[in-house]
Amino acid sequence: MARLAQHRVRPGPAVIAAVTVVMTAGALPATAAAAPATAARAAGGPSGISTLADRLTTPWGISFLPDGEAALVTERNTGTVWNVALDGSKRRVGTVPDVVWSKETQDKGGLLGVAVSPTWDGSTDTAVFFMETTATDNRVVRMSFDGTSLSDYTPVLTGIVRDTQHNGGQLAFGPDGYLYVTTGDAYQSKLAQDKNSLNGKILRITRTGEPAPGNPFGTAVYSYGHRNPQGLAWDRAGQLWETEIGHETYDELNLVEPGRNYGWPVCEGSCSKAGMTDPRKVWKPSEGGVPAQIAIVDDVIYASTLRGRRLWRLPIDSTGKGVKAAKSYYGDDYGRLRALAKVPGADELWLGTSDRGTEKDLLLKVTVD
């Protein structure tokens, strides 16, 4: 029962189109009355949404090619990778080997994050990285993408403990050129506090899977004390923000710094324990929470949610270290929302629905004011 509760399948539809929530760091957000969508837009935020591509099956990761004309999109359940152009046309470019996912056995790992090399050009640099759950572990793999198809499957970081859920799975290249990887605690919460374990962490590695230079412990570990981290994005100051699915009480938005301990399982949300770093925002799972991924547009954080079935807007405050009052959009209009990325060079987001059934998921285009 505990595991089913942690997966958090929303028990019923929400009817709120836009909700304002006031947040103080480390405190439970108080939900205000629903505001008309027009009023929310006047204050800045999403101003339009449309279907970009359809007939997808649980899109999990989105990573744009450096020219910004297309992105690679992963499907969790099938292991399939799509090349999706700005006009929404999509082309299957291959699958990632060894992916395990099964609805029948509740083994919900599968093909997770994707990160295209920042210098990818299809010829001298063809590197694309994926996070996948195999029968034995979670792993980061590198493949070659020539603009048409995938080849040359090469594991670069293996042995991350896997489970049916709590696999983390996000990949992203940072401004420093290194690859950041989120890993879950794999239902073994003690691993999150074990600095010798790869689980319950944000990792920072080279393209060959080695610890990146300057990591705080001389290993691949960048930060620890995470339960099931899902989203990564950097603001204009180069700071790393992360969304994390909690246990039963709070989900989190964290400002991540190297070497910091983010508390799990000692803390869920804010706490007074020495050495623990408090989140910048918390959600109650039943009040619009269970955040999946994040993207940042002009120092405004956008977060997709699974049980919450909405998109949150959280402006970074004047200190650069916290967030202002949050607003939510599309409450239950599209179901569970997961994959999220900013379109390069445009005030637009790509947002993926999740878990609607075989070839029933959508990739949505959100215009941001």
Image: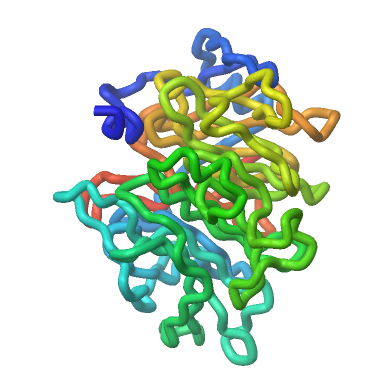
Q: Residue at x 61, y 57 (%)?
A: 203
Image label count: 0
In the picture, measured across the screen, residue 138 lies left or right of residue 12, that is: right
Comparing 332 with 338, the one in front is 338
Q: Position of residue 239 (x, y in %)?
A: 76, 46
Residue shown at 62%/83% (left/top)? 121
Nearest to the observer: residue 141 or residue 66: 141
Relative height, residue 142 to residue 361 (above, below): below
User: On screen, 323 above or below 348?
Assistant: above
Q: Is residue 285 left or right of residue 316?
A: left
Viewer can see residue 364: no
Coordinates of residue 320 in the picture (x, y in percent): 81, 34
**Going by the picture, which residue comes out furthest to the left?**
104
Residue 290, placed above or below residue 85: above
Q: Residue at x 65, y 29 (%)?
A: 279
Query: In the drawing, does residue 92 fall left or right of residue 143?
Result: left
The answer to whether residue 26 is visible is yes
Residue at the spot x=35%, y=46% of the render? 165
Residue 319 sits in which quadrant?
top right
Q: Is residue 301 above or below residue 234?
A: above
Q: Residue furthest right?
A: 319
Q: In the rendered image, which quarter contains the N terminus? A: top left
Q: Quadrant of the C terminus?
A: top right
